[in-house]
Each structure stands twice: as structure tokens, then as C-alpha cells.
Image: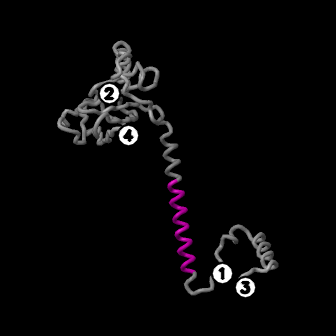
Amino acid sequence: MGIISPVLAAATVVNSKQMGLIERMAPPEDISVNGNLIDWLFAYTTGMNIFFFVLVCIGLFGFSWFYRAEDNPVQVEVLAQQWAWHFRYAGNDGIFNTEDDIVQLNDLRLPTDRKVVIQVLSKDVIHSLYFPNARRKVDAIPGRLTRMWWEPTKAGTWDIACAEMCGTYHYRMKASLTTYSQEDFAVWLAEAQEKALQENDPENPELFWGWKWQY
């Protein structure tokens, strides 16, 4: 009882091989009053899943292609501590945490009309790097690298603040952002690089607080 005979099993295999893919995927014949509603619901949910899957794929690969040219951003590492912001640019070697890095205290310089990627870490407690004029902020967390990106559009001097209560002298966590045209930024960067090469002391351990850039 409940055992399929070898002849019936063989016939079933032969019939399935003769059927096309669509026929094999089709549900069995409906012999109930409301079976068609179940079939419709199954087809509807399957269709919606396929639709949104395709939509997500288009968005994923479409935006990847659209932003493919954004491969040369300005990269800045930021170290927060009570009560200051340290900003680091890779030097001519393009590698962070080496002797030719440009290190700024409470003074961030960026070009306009160019993507900026910032990686942030805290030396002590939780801080929050806040650009009020850019409507951007990101937490600086001890032991955990966080990141943000944005693109300045206007030259000028702007405030940088800490948006996280980080202790008694929280109000001292202020810095300045200066944005330049790309040409003026290149001039400043060259001058800052020359100054760094002259003044950086390779024997000073406090200089090497940076990290290998995390992509």
C-alpha cells in the first residue's frame, strides 16, 4: 500500500521528459471551486517578487555604472579626541600614516565640486563630526572606523562642530572648514606638502596616529 509500481514510475519519468519546461512548471489541473484564486495569488506574488528583484538589480548596477567615474575623491582621515579634531591627508606617496603626510589641527581644507571621502576614529570617547552647512555628521567611535562622503559646492570658511556631548569641555570641540576652488586647493596642498616635508619629525610617535586607508 502506498508503493508505486515500477511500470507506473517508468511511465511518469517518460512523460515528464516529453513535457516542455513551461509544462513541467505549471501547477496540476485545478478541480476545485476556489483553486483558481489560489493560482492567481501565487502568480501575483511570484510576479511581484520578480518585478522588485529586477528593480533592485537595475538600481544596484545602474548606480554602480553611473558613479563609476567617482574614482578620484579627496581622502581625509580624522582623529577626534578631547578636545580637538586632527585631519590627515596622504602625502605625495599616496599612503596614509607615513612621514610625508599633511596633518592639520582643527583646520580642514577641501576643494569644491569634487567628492570628499572622510574616515573617522576617536581616541577616547564618542564624538560626532558635524558639518552644519553641509547637513552632514558622522559619529567618531573608539576602536571603530566610521566614514562619510559629500561634495562641497561653494568656496568659503565654515564651522565644524561636535554633535555629541563628549565631556566637560565639549564646547571646545570646534574646528574650521575652508573650501577652495580646485585650482586654489591644489596650490594650498602643494604648499602644505612642502611644509610637512620640512617640519614632520619622523621620531615623533604622536605624528603617526593614522591608519591604512580602508576601502
SS for dot 2: strand
Q: Amino acid at mark 1?
A: Glu
Is 34 situated left or right of 210 in this image? right
Which of labels 3 and 1 is toward the front? Answer: 3
**Is residue 167 in view?**
yes
* Circle 2 residue: 109
Residues at marks 4 and 2, CA–CA distance in whole angstroms? 24 Å
Residues at marks 3 and 1, CA–CA distance in whole angstroms? 25 Å
Residue at 25% over, 38% down: 162
Q: Is residue 48 above or below residue 118?
A: below
Which of labels 4 and 2 is toward the front? Answer: 4
**Residue 195: horizontal and vertical position, in percent?**
34, 15
Q: Which residues are drawn in magenta?
A: 36-56
Residue 144, numbered circle: 4
Residues at marks 3 and 4, CA–CA distance in whole angstroms? 64 Å
SS for dot 3: loop
Q: Amino acid at mark 3?
A: Met
Residue 201, numbered circle: none
Is 138 situated left or right of 9 in this image? left
Residue 1, numbered circle: 3
Q: Return the disc, 1 or 2, that comes first in the chain's sequence.
A: 1
Choose top left, top right, bottom left or bottom right for residue 31. bottom right
* Circle 1 residue: 29
Q: Amino acid at mark 2?
A: Arg
Category of crowding for the residue at label 1, using alpha-carbon neighbours closer than 10 angstroms: few (below 14), some (14–19), many (at least 20): few
SS majority, magenta = helix
Residue at 43% over, 32% down: 73
**Is residue 147 in view?**
no
Q: Return the disc, 3 or 2, that comes first in the chain's sequence.
A: 3
Q: Is residue 122 above or below residue 46?
A: above
Q: Are circles 3 and 2 on residues that touch, CB within 8 Å?
A: no
